[in-house]
Image: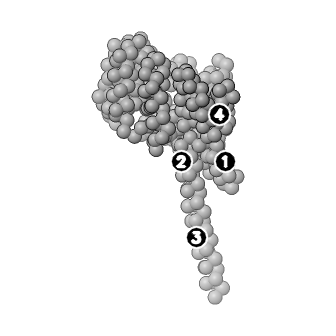
Amino acid sequence: MVFKTNLNYIRIAFLLVLLSGGRLLADDAQANALLQQGRVDEAHTLLQTMLSAQPGNALAHQLLCRVYYAQEMEDAAIQECELAASQDPSNSNTQMWLGRAYGMKASHANPLVAFGLARKVRYAFERAVQLDPENVQAMNDLGEFYVDAPAIVGGGLDKARALASRMQPQFSSQSHRLLALIASENKDMTTAEAEFQKAVLAGRTPSAYIDLGQFYQRQNQPDKALEALKAGIDADRRKDASLVDAASILTAMNRSPQTAESLLREYLSSPARSDDAPAFKVHVQLGNLLTHQGDPASAHREYAAAVALASNYAPARRSLQGS
């Protein structure tokens, strides 16, 4: 009887562990869903509660890093991603977000500090790709680093070309995009245009069309830019962050403000919202557009919506106070 009773206790304990694990997975999923929807205040509260009970939850630390990153709070983002990386060093996505957080801080730092951070950016992106050779987002980040960074911190166009070659068999469109960036860095705009066009042909994805449109915008070819953007918008069945990119380019060109407004509103009502374009930032972007259109009342509502989602996002608070 004693043995049977002890066995029952073991079964109960095992069941509790399973239930606890399932609850933690559900909490992780809920926190991620809140992050994707741009509801970062709610995500922050949930993640802090989770981490107070489970401080070793690496995924929760990674998600909290992304919550801070979305709000441009680089120091807090770095701290959380470093914790996530120390607890789960084999996670490619965590290394990628750590590299992004280092990069954000480097972009605001003095040259001496930025030099040290750039090395950390490179290591994190290279580690992310090493851990998961199919992490195409990390490959894109690493490729852009190689193109933009000087050799002294690990950049270099030869490295970028080698990476593009590795990407070609499985990620042809992204490979051509990287080759286009390399050509642009070399001031070879003919080759850059051809590579951006090849990226479109390789996948006909919304992002590839948007990249081509941005290239034409920078080359002061607005008609070609508009044609590429329209193709990208038409190809975006999911209504994802590509809509926001298209709206941003239209605004930069001072073209079709009504279309830009429509795209931003369409994204904000889409189930494909993500932290690629955090909803609270899009509300601020829409508010700025409405301000320029002479509609301060509607702009104020957008700024208020942004603050309601992300009360610590400084640009949203400033815009609301000034509206």
Q: Amino acid at mark 1?
A: Thr
**Residue 53: where, in percent of width, then height?**
68, 55
Would you name the residue on which mark 3 appears?
A: 15
For this rendering, which residue is in front, 203 or 250?
250
C-alpha distance separating marks 4 and 2: 19 Å
Q: Secondary structure at mark 1?
A: helix
Q: Secondary structure at mark 3?
A: helix
Sequence-earlier tag: 4 or 1: 1
Quadrant where the C terminus sits is: top right
Mark 4 to mark 3 CA distance (whole Å): 42 Å
Q: Residues within 10 Å of mark 2 (few under 14, many from 20)?
A: some
Label whose residue precedes the other's in the sequence (3 or 2) = 3
Q: Is residue 184 left or right of residue 278?
A: left
Task: Check disc 2 and report the residue beneath it.
Answer: 33
Asked if residue 309 shows in the view, the reply is yes
Where does the N terminus fall, quadrant-wise?
Answer: bottom right
Q: Which residue is mark 4?
A: 313
Callout in the foreground (3, 2): 2
**Residue 266, above or below 61:** above
